[in-house]
Image: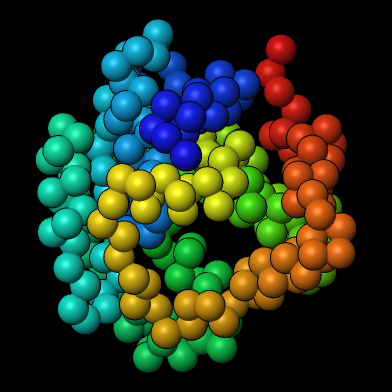
Amino acid sequence: MKLQQIMSKTRKAVDDYNMINENDVIAVGISGGKDSLALLYSLAGMRRFYPAHYSLIGITCDLGFDNVDFSAIKALCDKLDIEYHIVKSEISDIVFNIRNEENPCSLCAKMRKGAMNNFIKEHNCSKIAYAHHQDDVVETYMMSLIYEGRQNTFSPVTYLDRSDVTVIRPFIYMKEADIIGFVHTENLPVLKSPCPVDGYTKRQYAKDLIRSINDEAPGVRERIFTAICNSDIKGWRKPQ
């Protein structure tokens, strides 16, 4: 997939859910993975022609794992003319050593988002953009069904009243396979996840389950996503 196609799907999500307003300062959460780097690239490109003027700040939460080099991400941000910050933390030590969590993902995500929300408020950002894509939407929905017994997933736009931060997800119409193709085409500097449980999570189970169902019923991801878009799940009804 080419950059123009990526930006087209990004803009559709942004327009459908009113994600960007005039003079927004948007922090882009950059994990170093393929999704966040592709989102950064897309939003940087959209600045040239989007009718509402906005600026971007790249932000990475350093979880405290040893030997993680973010210099390639810094170089990419410099190339795209985006200010870049690394928020230092000791999250990995707290989750894996001090707390010794059996299911570490939830605590890690909560602490990581807390650290980033604090940073963006200090830097007067109006919003933070995360690179959750269509596959993530469907996988989260399946996890909610399997583990919670309810129909739910994250929203395209979420206002966090406690921290006064608005979360936007401009990649909700993007498929993971298309992101992978774009990242390879552009040769983006993807970092391998240093997390010891990467690939062994409940999300991975949901991903594998959906892949298995899709083998028997091709197109099931797209049909589930369409059902979510047409549902009464909070935040998914498009603004009028």
Q: Quadrant of residue 234?
A: top right
Query: Which residue is depicted at the point 31% across and 45% down?
Result: 186
Of residues 239 and 31, the one drawn nearer to the viewer in this rendering: 31
Q: Quadrant of residue 42?
A: top left
161 left or right of 184 in image: right
Q: How is the image coloured?
A: rainbow
Query: Which residue is depicted at the point 15% across and 51% down?
Result: 74
Point out residue 66 in the picture as x, y percentages from the top left corner. Answer: 21, 81
Query: Which residue is depicted at the point 37% across and 91% down?
Result: 97
Q: Residue furthest top?
A: 51
92 left or right of 9 in image: left
214 over 159 or under it: above or below: below
222 over 170 or under it: above or below: below
Of residues 122 and 193, the one drawn nearer to the viewer in this rendering: 193
Point out residue 21 in the picture as x, y percentages from the top left corner. Answer: 43, 16
166 over 110 or under it: above or below: above
Point out residue 44 in the picture as x, y percentages from the top left corner. Answer: 30, 30
8 left or right of 138 in image: left
Q: How many marks?
A: 0
Residue 74 visible to an observer of this rendering: yes
Point out residue 181 in the picture as x, y percentages from the top left corner. Answer: 45, 50
Q: Quadrant of residue 236?
A: top right
Position of the C terminus, as image quadrant, is top right
80 over 199 or under it: above or below: above
Query: Which residue is depicted at the point 32% across and 27% down?
Result: 45
Of residues 217 and 232, the one drawn nearer to the viewer in this rendering: 217
Residue 162 visible to an observer of this rendering: no
